Structure formats: structure tokens, C-alpha cells
Amino acid sequence: MSATAAKHGSEVERDADSDVIISQGAPRGQGGGCALAVGSHVLSRTVKETGSWTNYEDVLLGTVHLAAGVHDVSARPREIKDVALMNVKCLKLVPK
């Protein structure tokens, strides 16, 4: 992810509390902080150093309640330690 925000629409089929999980990779010395907005919820977290850009790990960012419908999902860096924040393989909304 670059220093600009990434944005995507995600459709939720039914009202539900959902875990927000990001599959991300970042080598030692990289990373920093990011904010992920899901609908009206904002989850902030420090990027986990996984050992390499391609060693992806699932990280639970938090739980949000979403109504059925389409919700914007966006990520924005808060700080970048060195040259880049992280690689993102996927973002999952897992209904409880």
C-alpha cells in the first residue's frame, strides 16, 4: 500500500456483528500504523512485522456491527516507519 488511501465497496447480506481480519505482511523495520474504516467504524492498529513482504499473517483488527447493504472499506496509513507500510493480501469480514 502506498502513502495514499485504498478504498473498496463491500456488500453485507444481513445485519451482523463481524470480525474484521486483514491478511498482511511486513518485514522487520517496516510497518507503522494504519486506520481502516469499515462503514462508519474506524479501527486503528500498528502493523505487525511478519518477517517479509510475502509472509502473510491474519490479524484481527476488531469487531464491527454492519447493517445489510454496501459499505465503503478504506485503509489509510497513519505513520510509516521506513519506506512502506505493509502488503495486503486480503481483508475479511467474518460474521459472528
Image: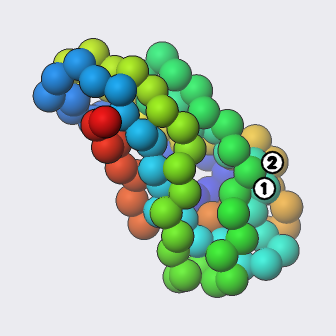
Secondary structure beneath label 2: strand
Residue at image x 55%, y 81%?
55
User: Within the image, what quadrant is residue 94 found in?
Assistant: top left
Q: Which mark is residue 81?
A: none
The quadrant of the picture occupied by the C terminus is: top left
Residue at image x 44%, y 42%?
20
**Callout 2: 10 Å neighbours few (<14), some, many (20+)?**
some
User: Within the image, what quadrant is residue 72 found in?
Assistant: top left
Residue at image x 84%, y 67%?
82
Q: Outermost residue toward the left?
A: 13
Q: Is residue 57 above or below residue 47?
A: below
Disc 1 designates what residue? Answer: 32
On the image, the x and y values in percent for residue 31 come to 74, 63
Residue type at the position of mark 1: Gly
Q: Report the number of numbered marks.
A: 2
Q: Outermost residue toward the front?
A: 96
Residue 88 visible in the snapshot: no
On the image, the x and y values in percent for residue 69 come to 20, 20
* In the displayed structure image, the side of residue 39 where residue 71 appears, left or right: left
Disc 2 designates what residue? Answer: 79
Labelled pair 1, 2 in contact (Cβ < 8 Å): yes
The quadrant of the picture occupied by the N terminus is: bottom right
